[in-house]
Image: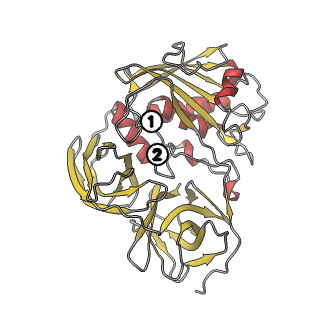
Amino acid sequence: MKPVRPILLTLVTLTALATSTLGGVVSSAPGRAEIQRLRWKGRTIRIDISSSLTRPNINIKYGSDVAGAIQRSIHAWESAADVQIVTGPSDKQSVSPAGLTGDTVSLITIAQTPENVLFFAKDSDSASAKTRIFFNRSGYITEADIVLNPFQQFSTDGTFGTFDLESTLTHEIGHMLGLRHSGVLGATMAESFARMGTFGIADFGARTLAESDMAAIRDLYGSAGDTNDCCAAINGKLVITSGKSASLRIWAEEDRTGRVMAQAEVNADGTFMLGGMAAGSYSLFWRSVDGNINSIGQLGPVKLEAGEAKTINEKIAVGADLLFAKYVGLNGQIADFSIPLTVGRSFMAYLGGTDLNARTATVEFNSPYLTVLPDSVATQDFDESVSVISFVVNVHPNTPAGDYSIFLTGDDGLRSCVIGGLSVE
């Protein structure tokens, strides 16, 4: 096959930066700000639904299934973990102001009140929603308020240019339960996701929890129902041999399929915890997450039995490699969220980043279900700030649904990775 003819690509920048902000204060480890592990003390959580959501609203497309979106987004988390979310109506419109304590009412709202508008003062054009969390000195959440951006448009039917209401709510309820953003691009808790029509398609993937989302929530609350193969954990410490500090992320991929099954940020002292995992055999990876440092490595295979906890302590070398894959894309666009693929088909996918060269780069997957078509890797035209290559990926008809990482190796042996950059639905 001849190399693909270069085309001009577009970097998608209008992503949904759904975030969580803290209403309380915790102490930080020296050298790096950290958010302590937060969760509700009980398993039953009350959320009030503002009338601004249940009555007609100009920010939500007429005819949208708002009530269904709310209940399905709640059910996604209840099905994964031992939590129960009880809802009720409320005439309250505004979130509690930032501070040490709120008003004890956890609320979901979209009202254009001064307090809600102030919440989006810095990112009204890009953020789809935000969650404000209040907690006590023991690290238990006492209140969590969700605000859908009153300057954005939402729908439940995939209308072009809108944010999917159910995906947004599912993400924010994850924050409400105590989860932080995920480094897995295809996870519901990923930092960014697309408006409808990005890449020329309507993507509803964020409505469904990724394996890494389920592991994270089970780590906090345990598993829903009688799950016999949960919940195992891997903990330990990574020591950087140079003695320098670096922000690191660790993740586990299932050996049989290559799916990303769990991920976590490494603490400032090098300790980490991957919890809520199913029994199985995994490959464990780490990578730096600093903006100007790109370095990855593998910690070897780990086999877990149900409920087992294993400890791994390793020394690692972190470098400043030039090769850096950051963006993925389809249909002439690249962005910092995963691309949805369907089984039994081939797709031309794109990788964007730094120092990417089709003549020297090898694209690989840690999965027997995904293969790169030989001789399909090609360099694409872009501006000077980002280098882009394309490749054709074949998705086997029996590929399990989930998130799969893209590994890139240069001719000098240096590697980079986009964690969960491909989402098979």
Determine whether, in the image, residue 384 is placed left or right of residue 295: right
**In the rendered image, which residue does mark 2 sit on?**
182
- The dot on residue 302 is none
Q: Are marks 1 and 2 in contact (CB under 8 Å)?
A: yes
Position of residue 231 measured from the top left corner of the image (x, y, whole percent): 28, 40
Q: Is residue 399 visible?
A: no
Quadrant for the N terminus in the image: bottom right
As drawn, 113 above or below 120? above
Q: Alpha-carbon distance for marks 1 and 2?
A: 8 Å
Helix, strand or loop status at disc 1: loop
- Mark 1 nearby-residue class (10 Å; few <14, some 14–19, many ≥20): many
- Answer above or below: position of 46 versus 170: above
**For this rendering, which residue is in front, 222 or 252?**
252
In the rendered image, is residue 365 in sight?
yes
Where, by quadrant of the figure, is residue 67 drawn? top right
**Residue beneath the point at 41% across and 69% down:** 415
Task: Decide if residue 119 is on the left or right side of residue 144.
Answer: right
Q: Position of residue 240 (x, y in %)?
A: 28, 56
Frontmost residue, 204 versus 296: 296
Residue lying at 75% horizontally and 48% vertically, measured from the top left: 160
The residue located at (31%, 34%) in the rendering is: 226
Tell me residue 339's x, y (percent): 57, 58
- Which residue is at the front of the view, 423 or 38? 38
Observer-nearest residue: 357 or 363? 357
Which residue, given by chain and number where applicable, does mark 1 sit on? 179
Give the residue type that dot 2 points to: Ser
Amino acid type of the residue tagged 1 in the rendering: Leu
Looking at the rendered structure, the secondary structure element under dot 2 is loop
Q: Around disc 2, counting alpha carbons within 10 Å, would you say few (fewer than 14), some (14 to 19), or many (20 or more)?
A: many
Q: Position of residue 84 (x, y in %)?
A: 44, 24
Picture layout, residue 42 above or below residue 312: above
Please determine whether, in this image, residue 400 is positioned above or below residue 48: below
